[in-house]
Image (cartoon, rainbow, N blue to C red):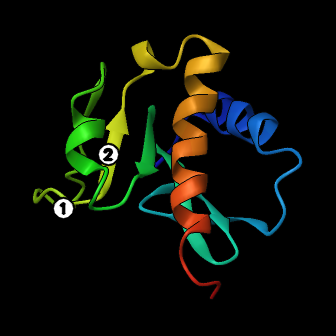
Amino acid sequence: MSFDKGLAQRIRDVLLDQDGLVEKRMFGGIAFMVYGNMACGVVREDLMVRVGPDAYEGALGLPHARPMDFTGRPMRGMVYVDGAGLEEEDDLAAWVLRGVNFAMSLPPK
């Protein structure tokens, strides 16, 4: 399965100075891990963001976000954001940093 390589590069640009960053193939796309915890990634043309269970409902209330249902069953704490919500660099950065902040709240792996 392919993924939007342009979106992946834009994420790399946002995370340029992030300590503990590793990229890993996952979910048929690419995931960005911070100290071993997934923060965000790209699946097909969508941004996948790990917001955590406490911020899940709030994230779903934001424009262009929907449940991550990769397996046909929504994964609580994970959302997809479609391309319309990522056109502006500030919007992309805000979503990516949501994922990084949640990943940083977890113990390193």
The residue positioned 21% from the left and 29% from the top of the image is 61
- In the picture, the disc for residue 17 is none
> Is 67 positioned to the left or the right of 28 in the image?
left
Q: Residue at x 55, y 11 (%)?
A: 87
Residue located at (65% from left, 36% from top): 5
Name the spot of residue 15 as percent of width and height, x first: 77, 45
- Distance from Cα at disc 2 to Cα at disc 1: 13 Å
Expressed as whole percent of the image width and height from the top left, the position of residue 80 reads: 34, 40
**Res 79 label:** 2
Check disc 2 and give the amino acid type: Val
Q: For numbered disc 2, what is the local secondary structure? A: strand
Work out whether residue 72 can be spotted.
yes
Total label count? 2
Q: Earlier in the sequence, mark 2 or mark 1?
A: 1
Q: Nearer the viewer, mark 2 or mark 1?
A: 2
User: Residue at coordinates 41% horizontally, 13% vertically from top-left?
Assistant: 84
Residue that carries the numbered disc 1 in the rendered image:
71
Callout 2 crowding tier (Cα within 10 Å): few <14, some 14–19, many ≥20:
many
How many C-alpha atoms fall within 10 Å of the one at disc 1: few (<14), some, or many (≥20)? few
